[in-house]
Amino acid sequence: MDSASGRRSKLAFVIAVVAALYWLAMFVGTHLPVVPDPNKVPNSWDKLQHLSAFAGLAVLLCAAGAAWDIPTRRLLMTVLGIIAVYGLFDELTQAFVPHREPDLYDWVANMLGAGLGISVYLVSRQLLGKQPS
C-alpha cells in the first residue's frame, strides 16, 4: 500500500470513528429522561436542535462515505435512507423514556436537517473543487 492510500485509509477510519461517536452521543442525549416543566412551557428550540443535530450527522456520514470512495449518488441516497430510518427509530424509542414522547414533527425536523447536512456536504465539495463520482 502506498503512503497516499494509507493516509486516505487512516482518514476514512478517523472520520468513521468521529461519526460513530457523534451518533452515539446523539442517541444518549435523546434518550436521557427530562425533567418536566411544571409550567408546561414548550421548548421553542426543540426543532432547531433536531435540525442541527441531524445536519451534523448527515455531514459526517457523507464525509465518511466519501472517504471510503462510495459513489456520490449512492452515498447521498444511502445517508438519507439511514437518517430516515434512524430518525424514526429514535423517535419511537423515546416512548420508553420517562417524560419523553415520539413526535412526528421532530422526525420532520430530523429529515430537514439531513437535507441541510447533505447540501452543506455538496456545497463544501464544490468549494473544494471535488467532482462527484
Image (spheres, helix red, strand yellow):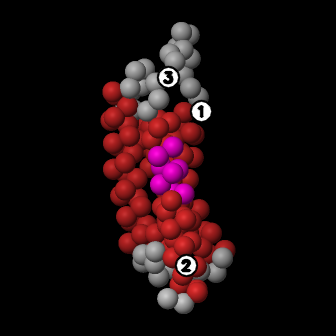
Task: Nearest to the eye among marks 2 and 3: give it.
Answer: 2
* Distance from the alpha carbon under mark 1 to that under mark 2: 38 Å
Q: Nearer the viewer, residue 68 or 121?
A: 68
Q: Position of residue 24 (x, y in %)?
A: 47, 46
- Mark 1 or mark 2: which comes first in sequence? 2
Which residue lies under the disc numbered 3?
34
Q: Position of residue 28 (x, y in %)?
A: 47, 38
Which residue lies under the disc numbered 2?
8
Q: Residues within 10 Å of mark 1 (few under 14, many from 20)?
A: few
Count of all numbered marks drawn on residues in the image: 3
Q: Where 101 sits versus 6, above or below?
A: above
Q: Amino acid at mark 3?
A: Val
- Mark 2 or mark 3: which comes first in sequence? 2
Q: Where 8 sits versus 111, above or below?
A: below
Q: Quadrant of residue 38?
A: top right
* Distance from the alpha carbon under mark 3 to that under mark 1: 15 Å
Q: Report the residue at 38% width, 72% height from top.
A: 74
Q: Position of residue 19 (x, y in %)?
A: 51, 57
Q: Report the residue at 43% width, 20% height from top.
A: 99
- Do we see residue 117 in this rendering? no
The magenta span reads: 18-25
Q: Where 73 sits versus 56, above or below?
A: below
Residue located farthest toward the right when viewing the structure as drawn: 127
Compared across the picture, whether 53 is left or right of 69 comes to right
- Mark 3 or mark 1: which comes first in sequence? 3
Which residue lies under the disc numbered 1?
45
Task: Nearest to the eye among marks 1 and 2: give it.
Answer: 2
* Label pair 1/2, CB-CB below 8 angstroms: no
* Label pair 3/1, CB-CB below 8 angstroms: no
Q: Residues within 10 Å of mark 2 (few under 14, many from 20)?
A: some
